[in-house]
Amino acid sequence: MSLKISVRSALPSHQKGDIIVVGVVAGDADSKKRDRPMLDDFDRTLGGALDRLLKKEEFTGKKDQQVSIALSGRIKADRLVVIGLGDMEKLGVADVRTFAAKAARAANGDKARRLVLGLPAGLESHLRAIAEGLELGAYRFTKYMTGDRKPKVELAQVDVCLVGTTGTKGIPNDAHAHVTLGQSTALGVNLARDLSNEPANVIYPDTLAEAAIKIGKEAGIKVQIFNYDEIQKRGMKLLQAVGQGSEHKPCFGHMSWKPAGAKRRIVVVGKGITFDSGGLSIKPSAGMGEMKHDMSGAANVIGMMATIGRLKPNVEVHGIFAAAENMPDGSACRPGDVWGSLDGKSVEITNTDAEGRLILADALAYARVLEPDWLIDNATLTGAAVVALGNGCSGWYASNDAAAEEFQLAVNGSGEQMWRMPLLDDLKDQLKSDSADLKNSGDRWGGSISAALFLREFVGNVANWIHCDIAGPAMGDRVRGWDPKGGTGHGVLTFLHLIERAEQAAAGANHPGAPDSKRSEKAPKKTEKPKKTPKTDKSSFRKKKSPRKRK
């Protein structure tokens, strides 16, 4: 359930709440400084106790500094938390969103239902990021907790107070619109987090597809689901190869938003390995439980499309995901097997634990027939990306510099940590097979790059292709910024910013958000005219079986 967020022109010390959190920019904590309306009002009411505490803790408003003080009934709240924002000139969207997320976490930590958030002058233009941060910071996955473990109270209401340098300041006319936009984007991220955090005995290919259908109905998004029989019929052989070793057979999802008169078409593809044991190239047991997050790319697609349904942009948007469990039974594919693909190329599977690129290959071959202006895929693809960039940053690849420049602007606007990686053609030799057109796994060195080169083989003539390897930040090992521990929904904000820029670009082809893109001149023979999709009712699914116990 979303927060109730109101914006008012008032001093936070005059508001009623369970906890008050205020932001202070560097230098504004000095008691000798003039025009400190928020801090001065608190300090007067507390008889000078606040300034004494700030001085004792050497609080200057530097980024990440934080102090708190009990209000002892003198103000209509239990506690005041003061958070340093750093230099105003250096304050970016990521910093503002993180500040709001910290405030929401402080409220949940205090078992507060109502938070009063005080913003210093200059942050009234960041209301979208504030709303995003509040929703993202308040997020907790507690579905399976019971008794004392289940939180009894959760944050429900936030009063955002805008404070000017000489007193209170009027509310911007578009304040409500920015808050609504921020909440809509954040709720899409939180939905992706929920799906990623679900255990693999709850979310498997069929139930992931059911989640997409449910979201589609709620958001007014068209949803098509291909069951296992349809996957085989269409020739999605690599998706079949990865998923046939599980009793939960693979499925394929296509969500679409097609407004009349749209001038841009964007397709986002997600990897949906709902559990990755490694197949016959089985993973070590340590850390295997985290492999429920290996469908984070597909979760991002569904979360993003939920937001698209709420915002209804004048851009045609398609969300596509391939879903499978990678399990080792008697029918699982083997190292050394050679399989065809929807594209027509043959692939030698040298490592069954390099399965994500296989299902994405069929998904990209399907997606390119839509002739998109942008084709983006996102996947928890390689450990090599984590080695290169750490747990908090994803790597991305672009088909050309113009596409890279525009995607970088979307990354900057979202504040997410992403770093462009090179598509080094020298590493293509790693993908040469003695028995097929390609093999699915190269050398250890440059593993993220060779995986991207493999995917590029299935993009066809799409001009603007972006591949995002989100293996590190898709699942947090600890709280970072606005991301929680567990599923993070990393990537959704950037994709939504790209779609926003495309909508703005639709008014003029010379807009920087509109790099030249030529439609594919020739689609692969087997996918020129996708066959009619079966209806998306439950009859299109196999009869479900109880999941097997895992050893």
Image (spheres, grey):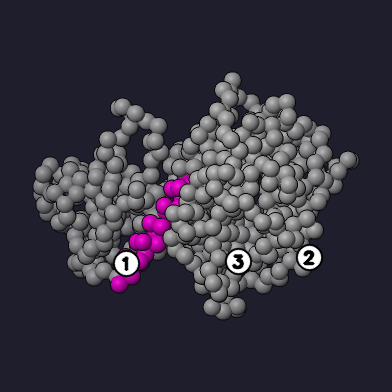
Q: Quadrant of residue 262?
A: bottom right
Mark 3 or mark 1, whichever is nearer to me: 3
Q: Does the magenta stretch include residue 236?
A: no
Name the quadrant of the C terminus: top right
Mark 1 touching mark 2, by CB under 8 A? no
Q: Is mark 3 on a helix, strand or loop?
A: strand
Residue type, numbered disc 1? Ala
| Residue closest to the eye, 71 or 259 | 259
Residue assigned mark 2 = 522
Q: Which numbered disc, 3 or 2, marks the residue that appears first in the sequence?
A: 3
Residue located 74% across and 57% down the image? 527
Residue type, numbered disc 2? Lys
| Residue closest to the eye, 224 or 108 | 224
Residue assigned mark 3 = 265
Residue located 32% across and 58% down the image? 25
Residue assigned mark 1 = 175
Q: Which numbered disc, 1 or 2, marks the residue that appears first in the sequence?
A: 1
Which stretch appears magenta?
A: 173-193
Residue 551 against residue 312 in the figure, above or below? above
Residue 37 against residue 110 in the figure, above or below? below
Label 1 CA crowd tier, 10 Å (few <14, some 14–19, many 20+): some
Residue located 70% across and 38% down the image? 242
Q: As drawn, is 338 to the left or to the right of 39? A: right
| Residue closest to the eye, 122 or 545 | 545
